[in-house]
Image (cartoon, coloured by chain):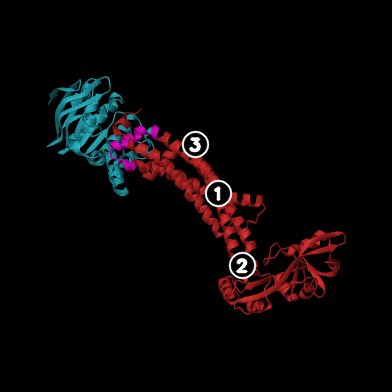
Amino acid sequence: MKVVELVDVYKIYKTEYYEVKALECVNMAVKEGEFVAIMGPSGSGKSTLLNIIGCLDKPTRGEVIINGVETSILSDRELTELRRDTIGFIFQQYNLIPTLTALENVELPMVFRGLSKAEREARARELLKIVGIEELANRMPREMSGGQQQRVAIARALANNPSILLCDEPTGNLDTRSGRQIMDILKKLNEEERVTVVLVTHDPSLADYVDRVVRIRDGKVVEDVF
Amino acid sequence: MYFELARRNLERARARSILAVVGIVIGVMAIASIGIFGNTMKQTVLERFQDEADTILILPRYTEGYSGIDEDDVELIEKVNYIDYAIALKDERGEVEYKDNKAFINIYGVKDEDDLKKLYNVYEGSIKLKGTAVIGYRVAEDFGVEVGDKVSIEDKNFKVAGVLEEQGMKAGISPDMAVFISMDDFDNLYDQEGYSLVVIEAESIAYVDTIEESIDSLINKKDEKVEIRDFQSLIESVEESMNSMTQFLMAIAAISLLVAGVSILNIMLMSTFERTKEIGVMRAIGAFKETIVLIFLMEATILGVVGSVVGAVLSLAGGYYIISMMGFSTAYILHLSSAFYISEGFVVGTVTAIASGLYPAWRASRLEPIEALRYE
């Protein structure tokens, strides 16, 4: 089953004087349980591609189908629900809410979904355990290392049992050792929990972890290797 | 969780939040304490009038050519139900002289000593009207007259039997600047047909209308002979003008709250700029626009409620200070109607804070998640 499907996707930024084609006729699909890396040099459009898959950005033209749902017809509210329930985001800068503890950060997507406090807390603790930092539950983000913060971010991304994890340079701000630990967690989630992972990176060493590499250059898919 | 989030965000910028709260505190205090002050003033003035509320005055209708009220009509009035007492008086402006002082003062003819006793209390001497006079407090003061002295009214000598207590307006007469003599003496001095005034005291305020209707149907049946006056409308208009003065003062005080509102608007706007990325993250992981609005409005509400509660409590002290500074009695501060002004201050303060949060909250919710995430 295809979790993500892009059909003839274009993303064109237009100004009065020039036009930038960030994405040009992109066709790709991600199957359930896959671990895909989107690779390419900076400015190649890989982040734009990830944002479009994550319904944070809309394509100028083309279809984006998530879990069988054509997203172009969805309202802002429906897109928000889709992001909340189906997609988990992991950012390069972790992007935790600075005023919330690790546990509360993990609870947040479940708050948005309207779960009870007891349910949220139980699930958040379980997730923190999965990413190996259950003892840091009451720490504030500023009291944690980058690697620890990224683990919280992974736990948060998993909060609502998403069908797909989207990771934008998840190891970009980390040292090699922490980066490897994060990748190990993602790999483990992919293998043991059957979580679909789409990862954007320009670090070729991460290619070892993934099932498939989609290479992108100047907004076009140039290679799709299994 | 949203409340916690809002609270912690306010704590994160503690100094800023405290300043915003102080603004609200000052605004609410200004509004509520001025309200309390105005209310005290109103209660004090009304209290002075309250004694008069059950008094009815019957006057000849001069515009219809009647210059006095007949003895027959007075007798009719005296028989009306629910009347505590009805006192008929004659009056004339007369020349009063004591030593070298001479002045024109209201001279009242009273049928019975007891009538005068019902109306006023004596300050010195006693109320006796047998060839003697009872004088008002200011007359005694201004002329330097004491009990036992002789004053001349229209060149006829009267011994002063008593001086009345100072009391301002009472029973439609200002007794402080008046002289009271017996009706016989009055008739000897002046040639006046009929009475110029009947003062009626109702058994209770509730009967005022009934009494007025009976008198009107008894005496004004054929001809509009008498005019019936009471103090209800006067009390109402005093109350009304006091209220509008208080409202006016409160409106001026509200300007300080407006300034506080602008400062909340300012800090909340700054907050939306600073937290653009945070808003983007929340939108990305599943927060609806309404959720963002809710979080920001909650912050404004916390500022408003905290400021208004503190302001409301302090307004009691503020009200006390203004009232005692202006020399009014502070007895009315804890009056039930003060609670109204305190809650008005509280509500206006809270609403101002929330209203000031509306625009920043709306702005924050309108951020596109992708733009907000890119914001550095």
Q: Which residue was labeled with disc 2?
A: B229
Give the mark nearest the N terminus, 3 or 2: 3
Q: Residue at x 72, y 71 (%)?
A: B90
Between label 1 and label 3, give the one nearer the viewer.
Answer: 1
Query: What chain does badge 1 belong to?
Result: B
- The 10 Å Cα crowd at callout 2, few under 14, some 14 to 19, many 20 or more, is some
Q: Are marks 2 and 1 on the same chain?
A: yes
Give the mark nearest the N terminus, 1 or 3: 3
Query: What chain does badge 2 belong to?
Result: B
Q: Residue at x 66, y 79 (%)?
A: B72
Query: What chain does badge 3 belong to?
Result: B
Q: Amino acid at mark 1?
A: Phe
Q: Which residue was labeled with disc 3?
A: B15
- The 10 Å Cα crowd at callout 3, few under 14, some 14 to 19, many 20 or more, is few
How many angstroms separate mark 1 from mark 3 (CA)? Answer: 33 Å
How many angstroms separate mark 2 from mark 1 (CA)? Answer: 31 Å
Determine whether label 3 and label 2 are within 8 Å by CB: no
Image side of residue B37 versus residue B165, left or right: left
The image shows residue B302, relative to residue B334, as above or below, that is above
Q: Amino acid at mark 3?
A: Ala
Q: Nearer the viewer, residue B308 or B86?
A: B86
Q: Are marks 1 and 3 on the same chain?
A: yes
The residue stretch that appears in magenta: B272-291
What label sits on residue B248 in the rendered view?
Answer: 1
Q: Amino acid at mark 2?
A: Arg
Q: Quadrant of the N terminus of chain B?
A: top left
Q: Nearer the viewer, residue B209 or B203?
A: B209
Q: Residue at x 23, y 20 (%)?
A: A41
Q: Which chain did the image draw in cyan?
A: A
Between label 3 and label 2, give the one nearer the viewer.
Answer: 2
